[in-house]
Image (cartoon, rainbow, N blue to C red):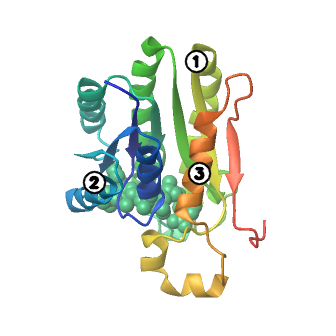
Amino acid sequence: MGANAIVVGVGASAGVGGALCRRFAREGLHVFAAGRTVEKLEALAQEIEGLGGTLTPVVTDATSEADVIRLFDTAEAAAGPPTIVVYNAGNNQFRPLLEMTAEFWEGVWRLCCFGGFLVAREAARRMVPAGGGTLLFTGATASIRARPPFTAFASAKAALRALAHGMAREFGPQGIHVGHVIVDGGIDGDQLNSRFPQFKESRGDDGMLNPDSIADAFWALHRQEKTAWTLELDVRPYKEQF
Ligand SMILES: NC(=O)c1ccc[n+]([C@@H]2O[C@H](COP(=O)([O-])OP(=O)(O)OC[C@H]3O[C@@H](n4cnc5c(N)ncnc54)[C@H](OP(=O)(O)O)[C@@H]3O)[C@@H](O)[C@H]2O)c1
């Protein structure tokens, strides 16, 4: 039993999920990494062990209530209540509104919002009796600005942000630091680079967010003294227009 982190939405090493796992492991926390692909999680576990940390892969679909409860039960049995929980899962799916099926809209909402609720509720259920913890959410430009063809994504990310704001007010006085990080720009990781390889070149040097630098911001939130907590911060490349 000891300090531990649960990161939900972990895939490639080159991504925010991978970077959060590396950062928390570097600080001595045991990490439970939750994503859908066992090969990616096991590769990350090996990478982190090579760096001197420890990581347990837990295959989880963040939109499944049973999976999320099982993830938290597994982590608690092995390591006690969570010190840090991050809801990082999200997919920047987009489509013109007239081409959005009901299934598409609901699928975006399930991953970008509903999964956040499932994870945050399980976190709070364990952090409240423990008397504290840090609960963080990964936001996006779309959390505060709806632009077509990202309307479904924006509606779900805005709702995730509202979940974070509501939970901060409900659980802050119980010692839980809730934070929402607006990632305002393209992330230099597998998700974007594999789907839109030309994007990186169009942005030029340092035109995208480095996942490890984003992870630094999450760690800084966790380290804040409780007399000066931040609910929301934004991060963007220095050359981003906003
Ligand atoms: N990429 C960008 O440019 C960008 C910009 C602004 C904000 N964001 C936000 O940043 C976060 C992700 O960062 P990232 O783009 O660097 O990606 P990432 O952290 O590398 O990847 C997130 C991982 O979530 C996993 N995932 C997807 N659906 C899941 C589900 N149902 N249950 C559990 N895990 C699931 C995926 O792995 P599996 O497929 O293996 O499950 C994926 O690899 C998201 O919240 C996103 O909205 C991204």
Q: Is residue 194 left or right of residue 142?
A: left
Residues packed near mark 1 inside 10 Å, few (<14), some (14 to 19) or many (20 plus): some
Q: Is residue 150 left or right of residue 241?
A: left
| Disc 3 CB within 8 Å of nearest ligand 1 atom | no
| Amino acid under disc 1 | Gly
Looking at the rendering, in which quadrant would you find the C terminus? bottom right
Q: Which residue is mark 3?
A: 216
Label drawn at residue 175: 1
In the rendered image, the residue lying farthest to the front is: 52
Q: Classify mark 2: helix, strand or loop.
A: helix
| Amino acid under disc 3 | Asp
Q: Earlier in the sequence, mark 3 or mark 2?
A: 2
79 or 202, which lies in front? 79
Q: Is residue 239 above or below residue 204?
A: above
C-alpha gap between disc 1 and disc 2:
31 Å
163 or 172, which lies in front? 172
